[in-house]
Amino acid sequence: MRDSPMRGGPRHEARGHRVYSRSKHRTGSLCRFVRVMAKNVEICVAVAYAAYCYYKYLHIISTSKIKKPWKKRRWWVKSINRNRTREHMDRQLSELLMEPGGEF
């Protein structure tokens, strides 16, 4: 089995490799874990900030639009829309054509 610098031994010391103790090794892996977590935290913060900026953009767009109040339909428009059948429309057209003004 090949010796690693983490295990130590005379071969590694002779080659100029560092020999780590177990506590140093655990600290190194902890530092590596912290670095990876820091990158993940940076990514999470960046995603959260982008989502916040997008939300604020949509909020500004929606508040800057002029919102017209909804108008209640007039009673005669309701009755016209309620009676929109083919026969009713044909009758209305014939009434328009029969008017004495002759405009239609």
Image (cartoon, grey):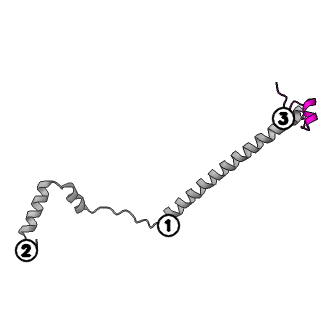
Q: Position of residue 80 (x, y in %)?
A: 20, 59
Horizontal side of 95 relative to 75 (left or right) equals: left
Q: Amino acid at mark 3?
A: Arg
Mark 2 and mark 1 in contact (Cβ < 8 Å)? no
Give the CA distance from mark 1 to mark 2. Answer: 49 Å
Mark 2 and mark 3 in contact (Cβ < 8 Å)? no
Please give the range of residues in magenta: 1-19
Of the numbered discs 3 and 1, the one sitting upstream in the chain is 3
Q: Amino acid at mark 1?
A: Ser
Residue at 46%, 66% in the rendered image: 65
Residue 64 is tagged as 1
Horizontal side of 48 relative to 97 (left or right) equals: right
Give the CA distance from mark 3 to mark 1. Answer: 56 Å
Give the CA distance from mark 3 to mark 2. Answer: 100 Å
Q: Which residue is mark 2?
A: 102
Q: Which residue is mark 3?
A: 26
In front: label 3 or label 2: 3
Residue at 11%, 55% in the rendered image: 87
Between residue 58 and residue 37, name the one nearer to us: 37
Label 2 SS: loop
Residue 3 within the segment the image draws in magenta = yes
Q: Classify mark 1: residues with Cα within 10 Å, few (<14), some (14-19) or many (20+).
A: few
In front: label 3 or label 1: 3
Label 3 SS: helix
Label 1 SS: helix
Horizontal side of 44 relative to 58 (left or right) equals: right
- Say which quadrant the C terminus sits in: bottom left
